[in-house]
Image (spheres, rainbow, N blue to C red):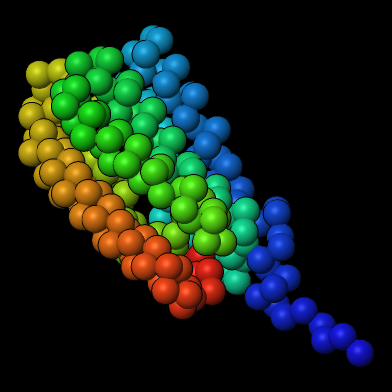
Amino acid sequence: MSELPSAKEIASDRLWTIPNALSTLRLLGVPVFLYLVLGPEADGWALIILMVGGATDYLDGKLARMLNQTSALGALLDPLADRLYIASTLIALTIRGIVPWWLLLILVLRDLALLTTVPGLRRMGFGNALPVHFLGKAATFNLLYAFPFLLATTGDTWFATACRPVAWAFVIWGTVLYWYAAILYFQQYRQLSADERAGRLPPPLSAP
């Protein structure tokens, strides 16, 4: 007689969960944000979109663990939404002249570098990526919270002036942690490649 699936296994197969709904909401906010920033330049509404995106980024992981609603779809949607938010916001703010081009280049090069590991990870049975390191999560947190402050620096008001040091503090820490997490990722990938050559490759890691 086959055993009944555990609650964790059932949760991992769910598609419609509160965390997945929040990640989907964050994804839908990306084109809205781009329109607001690059079209009518409605920075106030765009700022609200960014703040909602940052809040849902925190809540979806928290609720997934609290409600036992972790899922394979959620493990895909959450980092995808983060990457799209970071990329789209950087591009939009660079076009507007709020962010220098070199910051966009530094962060995009990091993600392009990580793409070089995808063929090897697929060959070893780890899919498209390894589980996210806590430093990577900290870097994403810093960058996602930097963008609303960067957008708020437009203009010559006292509020814009007050936001500038806060925004760039988040940017600097986020960028440093973003690359440091990538270095740790490459070290882990190199160790897995060495284990594969030695015939002692561990089983694929489950997403956190």
The residue positioned 59% from the left and 65% from the top of the image is 70
Quarter of the image for the N terminus: give it.
bottom right
Single out the residue that lies furthest toward the top.
40
Q: Nearer the viewer, residue 135 or 64?
A: 135
**Left or right of 164 on screen, residue 88:** right
**Left or right of 22 on screen, residue 86:** left
Q: Nearer the viewer, residue 119 or 105?
A: 119
Question: How far across and down, in percent of the image, does residue 182 sit?
Answer: 28, 52
Q: Nearer the viewer, residue 3 or 161?
A: 3
Single out the residue that lies furthest toward the bottom.
1
Q: Is residue 40 above or below residue 31?
A: above
- Where is residue 191, by image quadrant? bottom left
Question: How far across and down, in percent of the image, does residue 102 sit?
Answer: 16, 27
Q: Is residue 55 above or below residue 62?
A: above
Question: How far across and down, in percent of the image, does residue 197 sit?
Answer: 43, 68
Q: Nearer the viewer, residue 56 or 125?
A: 125
The residue positioned 41% from the left and 55% from the top of the image is 58
The residue positioned 66% from the left and 66% from the top of the image is 12
**Left or right of 12 on screen, residue 36:** left
For the question of whether residue 48 can be seen, the reply is no
